[in-house]
Image (tube, helix red, strand yellow):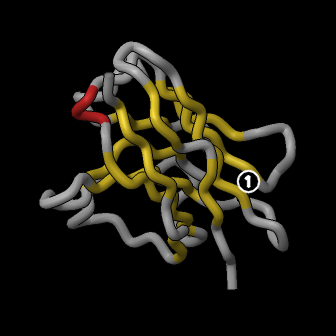
Amino acid sequence: QLQLVESGGGLVQPGGSLRLSCATSRFTLDDHAIGWFRQAPGKEREGVSCLSRSGITEIYAPSVKGRFTISRGNAKNTVFLQMNSLKPEDTGMYYCAADWKSHPTICEIDDSKAQYDYWGRGTQVTVSS
């Protein structure tokens, strides 16, 4: 069973940056597609970004494109989400998810289509002055 642990969340002022990490201790993530999702209070979960197994495909939600970057760490068990120019509407619980069975060049952030096998418990991001 792959266990994912998110970290790096916190309170930040508008315009600030955070780097979220998604890590697993027992397995590698370099053979998994990784997705980042978020959920604000009272709202449905939404996809933020994903990275395909091969690393060829990166997808970003329009609301974060140009501000967020997904990447794999040098250690094969970590994936990052660099978040810059944060806005109050970025506030929410951020979750990472892993999918081992997708085509190497495909990943998904549409929650109705995504079929991630493993999910973390989330890390809270609050953007407020």
Label 1 crowd (10 A; few <14 / some 14-19 / many >=20): many
Residue 63 seen: yes
The quarter holding residue 39 reads bottom left
- Give the mark count: 1
Q: Residue furthest bottom?
A: 1
Image position of 41 (left or right of 64): left
The quadrant of the picture occupied by the N terminus is bottom right
Q: Is 52 on the left-hand or right-hand side of 107?
A: right
**Picture quadrant of residue 59:** top left
Q: Where residue 12 sits: x, y (%)?
A: 45, 28
* Percent position of residue 42, x then y: 13, 60
Q: Is residue 54 visible?
A: no
74 lies above or below 100? above
Above or below, 86 against 117 in this view is above
User: Which SS class for mark 1?
Assistant: loop
Residue 89: percent from left, percent from top:
22, 33
Q: Residue at x 63, y 51 (%)?
A: 7
Give the x, y percent position of residue 91: 31, 40
Quarter containing the C terminus = top left
What amino acid does circle 1 point to? Asp
Give the residue pinned by disc 1: 30
The residue drawn where x is 74% and y is 50% is 78
On the rendered structure, is 54 left or right of 38?
Answer: right
